[in-house]
Amino acid sequence: MSFLIVLFSIIFLILLISYFKVNAFLSFLIVSIGAGLLLGINPSQISGTVQKGIGDMLGSLVIVILAGSMLGKLVAETGAAQRIAAGMMEVFGKKYLQVALTITGFVIGIPLFYNVGFVLVFPLIASVVYRYKLPALYVGLPLVAALSVTHGFLPPHPSPVALITQFNADMGSTLLFGTIIAIPTVVVAGPLFSKSLQNINASLLPTFKAEGLPEEKLPDLFNSFISSLLPVLLLAVTTGLNFIISADSPNKNIMLFFSDSSMVMLISLAVSTYTLGLSRGLKMKYLMEIYSEAVKDVLMIILIIGGAGALKETLLESGISNEIAGLLDNLNINPLILGWLIACVIRICVGSATVAGLTAAGIVAPLLATHPEVHPSLMVLSVGAGSLMFSHVNDSGFWLFKEYFNLSIKDTIRSWSLMESLVAVCGLIGVMLIYSFL
């Protein structure tokens, strides 16, 4: 019965938004409350569950999204994005542009959480799209696919690291196997798959569109790159130092402060305000006007993502993930496939990749004792791949992609959801191939 309620809730949400044209945030609230009642949550607790879901989701994202949008608008308006796009085209040419973006996404994705990485690289996607009149999904999907794969497969991302702990796997071998699987997965789900989507018209979020500036008014290439990618550089450095500095070091807390994504974004915005703005003669009042416009452009996105958090929390509170895991627990199949399958089903129903992965791990981890031929690192990657399966309307990543690329729900499913499904399937294929050789 719970499956039918979840299915009905998702269909009703889609109808509210696409057919009845109800605001997406309000639609999420309506469906979250209705699903909570139907799934048996105490009516007195539903309001608190919805509020907790919104708070938990936005608490970790609102500073990142707002500061990232301000930085993106600054990069666009000052001509830094124009300079970067020109530099990339000069080095790689139009023919190899997807290769350049895929590599960029893979490198950036290793130290960054997916949502943070997406917000940071979107201005770069937009600059290439607007500057050279290329299809947005053709340009953006390879980079986004690389971000998603690194988020699900590779440490130091929280989900793979947590799975490594649950399966008692080795960090080094997980990173090695994960990289071997990730590269062909990104190629299939990114550059190859994007070629089938060129008929989808994605008109990007307008905040990152700026009029072309004359050459003499552009910042230099070094300043443009450093200012735009400063958050990536800071996170990469601080992530590396966190592994080096021991837990009992007096500098550990200071490093944790500077490695927090919100702090990194605020520091980067402050530095870029000077390097791209004040140092080039722009007035503070003008820069603050740019930031105000950036905030207006993403407010609805923030509300929609908060709404997705409300629905996710409602489904978690109902215990649907444990119910799904219990039904699939007794299937007599290879633990690698079983872990992948459980993670897939929970991901589709609940929307959270982390919850799907950790729940699946708790079910299949005991099986490793009776299956010594299964390498723990492959178990991590199998479950991690399954946790990315078919992201849709109950996942904040779905709405982030939809709103930034300005797509319909149908086209977001055709592009983002299918791309995530390709990542999940290719990941499992890669795991089973390595398994067959070990």
Image: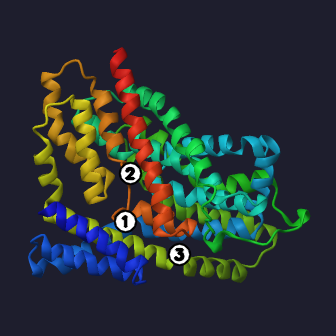
Q: Which residue is mark 2?
A: 253
What is the distance, in whole Å, between disc 2 and disc 1 at their CAs? 37 Å
Going by the numbered disc 3, the residue's amino acid type is: Val
Could you tell which of marks 2 and 1 lies nearer the N-terminus?
Answer: 2
Q: Residue at x 30, y 51 (%)?
A: 354
Q: Which residue is mark 1?
A: 393
Quarter of image, res 170: top left
What is the distance, in whole Å, between disc 3 and disc 2 at their CAs? 32 Å
Circles 2 and 1 in contact, beta carbons < 8 Å:
no
Going by the numbered disc 2, the residue's amino acid type is: Asn
Whether residue 53 can be seen here: no
Q: Secondary structure at mark 3?
A: helix
Could you tell which of marks 3 and 1 lies nearer the N-terminus?
Answer: 3
Q: Residue at x 79, y 57 (%)?
A: 83
Nearest the eye: 109 or 243: 109
Q: Tag 3: Cα neighbours inside 10 Å, few (<14), some, or many (≥20)?
A: some
Q: Which residue is mark 3?
A: 298
Please give left or right for residue 233 compared with residue 428 in the image. Answer: right
Please give left or right for residue 191 compared with residue 235 in the image. Answer: right
